[in-house]
Image (cartoon, rainbow, N blue to C red):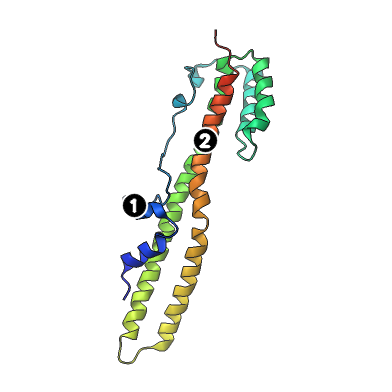
């Protein structure tokens, strides 16, 4: 007879190697280390408190426009270098203006990243619940088959339910590698954006 924990691990282990090493956080099934929050100060080299910067309508509009382009994950950063260069030229390489652009991008992408991490947690919990459901139905089928006069209609129904649940579980698991990589890709993009903006900064 299958045991619930044994089946859960058997289902999870092939697709989620991280779980084979650490079961301490069932909401994080990824190989990548879980980093829930990022710090803009670790990426941006120049001291800046965006809340303390005096508003400037024209500059702030340019900042929002540049940040909007930089936040588009599907657009390679190298394609955006001319926009960054033009912005830097307009503001004389001012680290403050460039920093405002970075912090605006950071706010957008870090919020997106947090939503994805929360979604991964929900996904993992739903997969664990489905694995436990498969376990329970296998146990129920084994109990039924152990009877002197099994109810084969009930056994057939359980077997069909197990088959469908396993198909659903496996199909969902095909997406986990992409889901797990996405927060890392956003983090790398933020570092890349910070470096690109800092390269055109003019520091006196």
- Disc 1 and disc 2: Cα gap in Å? 25 Å
Q: Residues within 10 Å of mark 2 (few under 14, many from 20)?
A: few
| Residue 83 shown left or right of residue 117 in the figure | right
Q: Marks 2 and 1: in contact by CB < 8 Å?
A: no
| Residue 100 shown left or right of residue 148 in the figure | right
Quadrant placement of the C terminus? top right
| Residue at figure coordinates x 51%, y 21% from the top left | 50
Residue 106 screen position, x and y as percent: 52, 31
**Closer to the camera, 6 or 147?**
6
Badge 2 marks a residue whose secondary structure is: helix
**Closer to the camera, 138 or 68?**
138
Residue 124 screen position, x and y as percent: 42, 55
Relative to 123, residue 94 above or below: above
Relative to 65, residue 204 above or below: above
Residue 137 screen position, x and y as percent: 38, 74
Give the mark count. Answer: 2
| Residue at figure coordinates x 40%, y 70% from the top left | 134
**Residue, disc 2:** 188
Q: Residues within 10 Å of mark 1 (few under 14, many from 20)?
A: few
Residue 78 screen position, x and y as percent: 65, 31
**Closer to the camera, 112 or 175?**
175
Q: Which mark is residue 176?
A: none
| Residue at figure coordinates x 44%, y 33% from the top left | 38
Judged from this view, the residue extending furthest toward the top is 204
Relative to 20, residue 50 above or below: above
Looking at marks 1 and 2 on the same chain, the residue that comes earlier in the sequence is marked by: 1
| Residue 77 shown left or right of residue 128 in the figure | right
**Residue, disc 1:** 21
């Amino acid at each position: 007879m299958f045991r619930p924990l044994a089946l859960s691990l058997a289902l999870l282990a092939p697709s989620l190697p991280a779980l084979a090493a650490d079961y301490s956080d069932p909401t994080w099934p990824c190989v990548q280390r879980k980093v829930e929050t990022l710090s803009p100060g670790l990426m941006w080299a120049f001291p800046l408190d965006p809340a303390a910067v005096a508003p400037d309508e024209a500059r702030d509009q340019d900042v929002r426009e540049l940040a909007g382009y930089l936040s588009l994950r599907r657009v390679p950063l190298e394609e955006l270098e001319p926009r960054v260069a033009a912005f830097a030229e307009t503001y004389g390489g001012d680290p403050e203006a460039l920093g405002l652009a970075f912090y605006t991008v950071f706010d957008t992408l870090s919020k997106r990243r947090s939503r994805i991490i929360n979604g991964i947690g929900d996904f993992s919990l739903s997969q664990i619940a489905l694995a436990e459901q498969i376990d329970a139905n296998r146990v129920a089928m084994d109990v039924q088959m152990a009877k002197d006069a099994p109810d084969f209609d009930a056994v057939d129904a359980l077997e069909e339910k197990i088959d469908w649940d396993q198909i659903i579980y496996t199909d969902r698991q095909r997406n986990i590698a992409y889901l797990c990589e996405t927060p890392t890709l956003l983090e790398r993009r933020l570092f890349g954006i910070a470096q690109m903006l800092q390269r055109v900064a003019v520091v006196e």
